[in-house]
Structure formats: structure tokens, C-alpha cells
Amino acid sequence: MQKLAVGIDIGGTNTVFGLVDKKGNILAEDFIFTKEYLIFQAFIDELCDRIQSLAEKLNCELVGIGVGAPNANYLDQCIQNASNLPWKGKFELGKLLSQKIRVPVFVTNDANASAMAEMLFGGAVGMKNFMVLTLGTGLGSGIVVNGELVHGHSGLAGEMGHMIVRPEGRHCGCGRLGCLETYVSATGIKRTVSKLFAKFSYSSELRNIPFNRMSARRLASEAYSGDQIAIEAFEFTGKILGIALANVIALNNPEAIFLSGGLSKAGNLILKPTQYHMEQNLLSVFQEKTQLKLSSVEGNSGVLGSAALVWKVVE
């Protein structure tokens, strides 16, 4: 019977999960809508039922579960007050999953999971010092130093999305003002577009789209078609991100920074302005420039990276 690991990527909109072999092949994949489950236990019950259904279809043996989630703590396997998730408080994610599916469970920050995927299956193979930024509903960051993920003193390192980049700026789901993810994320760029509608009188197809139906994909499509509002939105977003990355490089001097997630699918629209403003604001001692790249992981990096947590430990 084939042995497979479960990789779970809990996002603010969707929770994607898959069964992954040791070579990084996703053999089965499914998802549920995270925001439909306002009670955490109901979310766990549905998630486990769907995972077991996938395992039965493949007639495989599950050897472990890896989970990447916002505000997830690698040390205690809990999630707590993630601003983009519907549950507030502290929840024993690892314990609840292992009670339903009797296998080892490993929990980490969702961006840490993406960093694991990049290190094992993507562009960071062979690198010892790099970062992965996940640009989705929010902004997460996975940091690798000397070949090891950085977890920090209490297991919660890597919250770059909650660096305050504009004091007294936009209200964030964490309760503070001016966090990076309120500007640099799929949600953040939509908020920027709303501001630009008032600032400029440009004709734009985007003016006809309600805020809750606008997407990063549509913004990218309009920008590539020459929509000036969309172009300005990506330029502004890249500027904010580039300056923030220049500050982070001064702290950990990574060889490369990889962008993943929905907003990164815009390609050069986000990559070029980010790289320009990053390099313009770098400390002069960094003569060897940090590479800024799009993730090259094929498939869902959150699922692959979460499953890699299992394969790193389970034989």
C-alpha cells in the first residue's frame, strides 16, 4: 500500500489539502471554503472527512499530516487570532486533527510551509539563506537562515505582513494601523484601487466592479490591457513592498526572495516595481544584490510545503 503525507494549506478564503508522495507529487487534491465554517470544530470535522475520503479513493496509507496556517505555532501546534481567519481565540489545531486522524501532525506558519516547498522542490534548492513571501488574502513570510526555518523564541517568527510600514495608516485585521499586508496583498491592492478611483479621473473598467467581486487576477488583466488605474495600483504596491524588503535585507541578508500566492501571478506588474524600489533603498554595503524571483514551485506550494514537514521526520 502506497504511503502518502497529507498537506493542508489553510487560507483566509480557501483551505486546500492534498495527498503527497515523498518526491513531491500531489496525487489527489481538494478544497473547502474556509469562511463557511464559523465554528472551528465544524471546520475540522469537514476537513478530516474530506481527507479520509481522498485516502479511501487512492487506497493509501497516511503517514502524517502537515499544516500551514496563518498565526500557526510550530512549537505548540496551535493557531491564535489570525486576522484573516474567521475564528478568534486559540485553537489546538494539531491535537484536534490527530484525534480525528490517528497519525503524527506537524503545524507551522503557512509561509513557512511555502518556504519548505521552495527549498525542497523549487528555486531555493541548494540555498541556505532565503525568504518566501506569500501574497494572498494577507501577506506571510517564511525565513530560512543557514538552512533552517526561523521559528523564533515562541514559535511565531516570520510575521512580515504585520510590520508597520505606515504609522496611522490603513486599519488591519490584527487591530493595528499601517501593517504591510493592508497594502501588499490581494486585499490590500483592492483597497489601493478604491483610493485611486478618488485620486484620478481616468476611465477604467474597474469602476464598474463591486469591491467584493474584484480580484487580483482581474486587476492584472486590466493592467496588461493598459488600464491606468490598475497600472498605478501595481506601481504603488511594488513601491511599498520594495522599500519593506530593503529594510528586511538589512536584517538577514538573504541570497534570494521568492514571491508566491495569488498576487504574484501578476508577474512583472508586481516584480518590476518591487525590484526597482528594493534596489533603490538598499544599504550600500550590500554590493551583491539579493535576487527577487517568482516562486517556481509547481502545484500548491502550501500543500507541498506542509507535506514536506511530514517527510522530513517520517520515514
Image (spheres, rainbow, N blue to C red):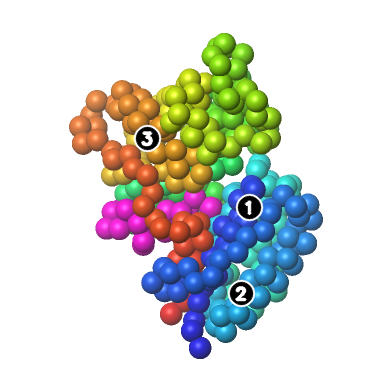
| Three-letter code for the amino acid on which mark 1 is drawn | Asn
Q: Residues within 10 Å of mark 2 (few under 14, many from 20)?
A: some
Choose between 290 and 52: the one closer to the eye: 52
Instruction: Identify the residue shown where x is 48% and y is 34%.
Output: 220
| Three-letter code for the amino acid on which mark 2 is drawn | Leu
- Answer with left or right where residue 295 lies relative to residue 288: right
Instruction: Identify the residue shown where x is 49% and y is 84%.
Output: 2
Q: Tag 1, which secondary structure?
A: strand
Choose between 139 and 60: the one closer to the eye: 60
**The stretch drawn in magenta includes residue 111:** yes
State the mark number for residue 268: 3
- Establish if 19 lies above or below 134: below
- Asked whether disc 1 touches disc 3, contact meaning CB atoms under 8 Å apart, the reply is no
Residue 199 percent location from the top left of the image: 57, 12
Name the residue beneath numbered marker 2.
54
Determine the image quadrant of residue 185.
top right
- Answer with left or right where residue 82 lies relative to residue 129: right
- Establish if 241 lies above or below 14: above
**The stretch drawn in magenta includes residue 156:** no
Name the residue beneath numbered marker 1.
14
**Residue found at the far bottom of this picture:** 1
